[in-house]
Amino acid sequence: MGKIITIANEKGGVGKTSLSVNLGAALSIRGQQVLVIDMDPQGNASYILSKNAHDEKPSMYEVLIDKNRKISSIVEETTTNGLSLAPGNLQLAGAEIQLIQTYGREFALKRSFTPDVIEAYDYVFIDTAPSLSLLTINSFVAADYILIPVFSDFLSLVGLNLLLDTINISQENLGSNVEVIGFVITKYDCRENISDETINLLKAKFGNLIYKEVIRVNVKLKEAPSKRQTIFQYDPVCIGARNYLALANEFLNRMNERNK
Ligand SMILES: Nc1ncnc2c1ncn2[C@@H]1O[C@H](COP(=O)(O)OP(=O)(O)OP(=O)(O)O)[C@@H](O)[C@H]1O
Ligand SMILES: [Mg+2]
């Protein structure tokens, strides 16, 4: 059975989409079947992965609003073998407003996960918006695990408490068993002392939850999204691609340990 992993951090630009898309692509290179679900109205993961971003096909908006529509009905293949996409777009902002008025509003995404979706993939990654919105809460409630990308500057750490509090609320008030399974440093700059200081602070607080493999700051990772490519399509030998492959290996090892 596949595992559902929400990628979240309410701070903007910390690498949520990069992690969803490139860890997903790295895992598919490692032979895994992966689905990326775009729960961000910005639609960045969809822009990168979709072959047909500008058409009017149904997206996660319809899945959230229409109780009879299942995720499998909107899934698209991407140009990466083994990597599929459930697209999202600006309409999701409307879903947020519509959902607020409905009963069971935190469970709309969970409800749409039928067994066929969970069985078709090894891993499902949910890319979220930089906010602790109802869409993000839905993404916590629907997931087995949460993976948190962090930027290695000090101020990024300050916001983490709010994120962890919101996850606690999902666990305690909404009966969710979701568990934080790790923090990934997504923009590590080895030239800056502050990066190492922040990593040491994170390790002191979260210990083994901090992934050992870090993603270094790499201009190719910045350029790839504008070409609508994963890092493995844009430059498969760059440091960013190598970092993401190493991260995928660590991810798979950690998952195997967990499921022993
Ligand atoms: N290791 C890296 N080195 C350089 N640039 C990076 C790296 N990782 C991500 N980026 C770039 O940083 C920007 C923000 O990354 P990304 O979109 O993944 O963050 P995000 O958390 O999803 O943002 P948002 O909160 O807006 O959804 C993008 O332009 C991305 O290409
Ligand atoms: Mg994003």
Image: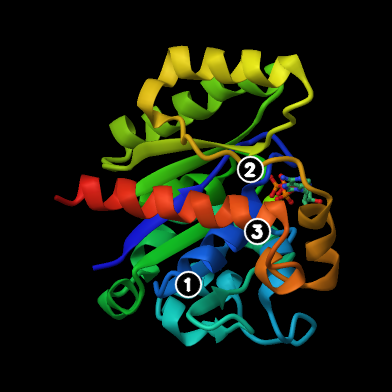
Ligand 1 within 8 Å of disc 3? The answer is no
Q: Position of residue 209 (x, y in %)?
A: 39, 30
Q: Is mark 2 within 8 Å of ligand 1?
A: yes
Residue type for callout 3? Ala
Badge 1 residue CB within 8 Å of ligand 1: no
- Residue 118 horizontal side relative to residue 31, left or right: left
Give the residue displayed 54% in from the left and 47% down from the top. 136
User: Which type of secondary structure does the marked residue at label 2 adopt?
Assistant: loop
Dot 3 falls on a residue whose secondary structure is helix
Residue at 85% across, 66% down: 226
Numbered circle sitting on residue 228: none
Q: Is residue 127 left or right of residue 12?
A: left
The residue identified by callout 2 is 215
- Residue at the outermost front position: 237
Image quarter of residue 3: bottom left
Q: Kindly report the distance in space between the C-alpha atoms of the residues bearing marks 3 and 2.
A: 9 Å
The reply to whether the C-beta atoms of the residues labelled 1 and 3 are less than 8 Å apart is no
Circle number at residue 28? 1
The residue carrying pointer 3 sits among few (fewer than 14), some (14 to 19) or many (20 or more) residues within 10 Å by Cα, namely many
Gap between marks 1 and 3 measured at Cα: 13 Å
| Separation of residues labelled 1 and 2 (CA atoms) | 18 Å
- Locate the N terminus and report the quarter of the image it occupies: bottom left
Q: Residue, x 22% and y 45% (percent of image)? A: 258
Q: Is residue 149 above or below residue 121?
A: above
| Type of amino acid at the residue the image marks with label 2 | Ile
Whether residue 101 appears in this view of the structure is no
Give the mark nearest the N terminus, 3 or 2: 2
Residue 118 lies, with reference to residue 8, above or below; the image says below
Residue at the spot of label 3: 241
